[in-house]
Amino acid sequence: MNGLGKASAIRVPPTIHYRSANIDGVNVFYREAGPADGPVVLLLHGFPTSSHMFRNLIPLLADRYHVIAPDYPGFGQSDAPDRASFAYTFAHFADVVDSLLHQKGVESYAMYVMDYGAPVGYRLALKNPEQVSGLIVQNGNAYEEGLGEFWDPIKAYWTDGTTERREALSGMVTLEITKFQYTDGVRDVSRISPDNWVHDQALLDRPGNREIQLDLFYDYRTNVPLYPQFQAFFREHQPPTLIVWGKNDKIFPEEGAHPYLRDLPQAELHVLDTGHFALEDKLDVMAPVIRDFLDRKVAKTD
């Protein structure tokens, strides 16, 4: 009897559903959890991962929040249609996510944007500024200060778009670089599961996926001219914003975090001693901060 009483006091983790939606003939996978009538939190992943990066955060939010975490086409468990029939662009990804939200009847949402998730999410914000109830920004850029030395070979590809420049970026989709993204700048690498780079690399190595990723490296050039529009959205709408940034990230360095405060002076900024995928080793620090922010700034407005 006592044992049963103790067991009943254990907090039951929220149920996570693994679903797909048909968006213009493409099956788009997404993770979903939490109360159907709860405030929506949209989790937008980076490169080279998927909604898998949010697997540990989702249960910590889903008791109160309706969490939706999609995989972009070509990533994770979503379809990877042939490049001849599907445009792998950030504008198209934003349209796909917008269609998914429309299918689900979502009219208001806070966004967690990271890496590629930033230009996808900010394009969504330009389309539907009134729908954005808050922003959580983690190593996702909207200012040119954040495009440092790491980006030089990618910028060179933007400049001339030659096959030579494209092929020079092939190393970016190798196991060495995938592992680097998870481990560089991390003080205690024993906190990083090797399942991360094994999982991501297996998907990168699918036939045709290398070319998809190189297409996206080239298309990233279309995001930079939109930075002034992203910044105007920040200034004009002043969405409640939390910035949690891994300061040791060589891809999106700390220099990209502070300019947000020019346009969002009320934003809450936390600089963390970690690298690119901060949730992997700093979840214990980040989750309480994220939850507190959502409870104070988002739940009360929904």
Image: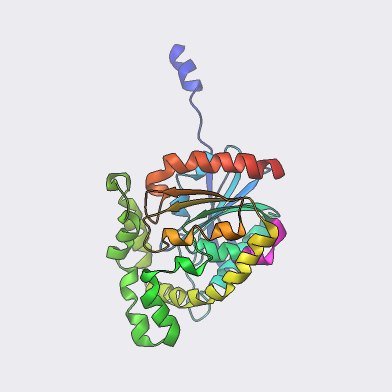
Residue 283 in percent (x, y) is at 43, 43
Residue 257 in percent (x, y) is at 49, 58
Position above or below: 267 against 89: above
For the point 44% across and 81% down, the residue is: 158
Query: Is 111 positioned to the left or the right of 163 in the image?
Result: right
Quarter that holds the C terminus: top right
Position above or below: 149 against 156: above
Highlighted range, magenta: 123-131
The number of callouts visible is 0
For the point 56% across and 68% down, the residue is: 93
- Which color scheme did the rendering employ for the protein? rainbow
Position above or below: 261 against 172: above
Residue 127, magenta (yes or no) = yes
Query: Is 259 positioned to the left or the right of 279 in the image?
Result: right
Q: Nearer the viewer, residue 64 or 5?
A: 64
Q: Nearer the viewer, residue 193 or 273?
A: 273
Residue 13, magenta (yes or no) = no
Residue 31 in percent (x, y) is at 53, 51
Q: Nearer the viewer, residue 276 or 67?
A: 276
For the point 59% across and 64% down, the residue is: 122
